[in-house]
Image: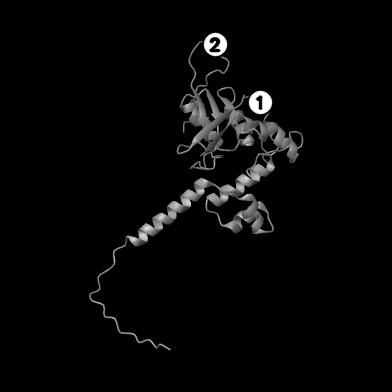
Amino acid sequence: MTDSKHFTPVPRHRPVGSQWGKWDLHFHTPSSFDYHDKSVSDQQIIEGLGKNGIDVVAITDHHFIDVQRIKNLQQLAGESLSVLPGIEFRTDLGGKETVHLIGIFPENCDLEVVKSDRPEDLIFQSVRTGVSMRDNNILSRHIKPAARKLGLPWINWRCLRTSHATWMVEAGANPKDVQGQMRHSRISTTMDIYAQFVPESQRRALAKMSAMVEARTSKPVAATGSISMQPQSRTVN
């Protein structure tokens, strides 16, 4: 890292077109779960960005907006660097290749909208108080619009619970663990009502069985020489 006193800041409010700026809109900090060196400080981050001549940076940690860190980075950067809040989501729904979704927000956006942003806190929380939102509000304001964008005409909480149970079974989870996740008193409720029949899952199960049978039947039998069989007597009434 370069000492900050040797870094000549670039004025944030430059005349349009006067010179090119260097932006980094995909930057991770130790707040990301897979960041290797958790000991890196915010001061070191700002100094490192300055060393590389970055004028604007977007903090896009994985699945998490660390409000306190972003505020601290903005304060440390001062007028020399614009720090934009952001987030990056990763999903395997794209097939073999992982899909990365990045959201970037204005520098002066109201980060206080998120009342509590620790990993164990609520995802859907009230803007005014930070308490849990009503389930109907979550469904109508967030989940149903997202479903319509995916081409799903109708969805409710039961659909999500059914999908959760089915995917856990498909992933090979122990049925008792699935029951615990679903908070069912009887495992029959989990397996007979919520876990759905999935043809692709059945085909994978048959393929595994076929591979097992083939592996067992293809093993060579070790030669042990001649085998003598003792005659057996049988009493017939």
Q: Is residue 161 left or right of residue 210?
A: right
Query: Label 2 sits on what residue type?
Result: Val
Looking at the picture, how far across and down is residue 221, in whole percent? 29, 67
Between 198 and 230, the residue placed more toward the observer is 230
Pick whichever of labels 1 and 2 is earlier in the sequence. 2
Query: Label 1 sits on what residue type?
Result: Cys
> Splitting the image into 4 quarters, where does residue 84 fall?
top right
Residue 121 can be seen in this image: no
Position of the C terminus by quadrant: bottom left
Q: Is residue 220 left or right of residue 126?
A: left
Q: Which residue is mark 1?
A: 109
**Crowd around label 2: few <14 · some 14–19 · many ≥20 (10 Å):** few
Residue extending furthest front? 237
Q: Is residue 198 left or right of residue 206?
A: right
Residue extending furthest left? 225
**Crowd around label 1: few <14 · some 14–19 · many ≥20 (10 Å):** few
Element carrying mark 2: loop
Element carrying mark 1: loop
Q: Which residue is mark 2?
A: 16
Looking at the picture, how far across and down is residue 202, in whole percent? 50, 50
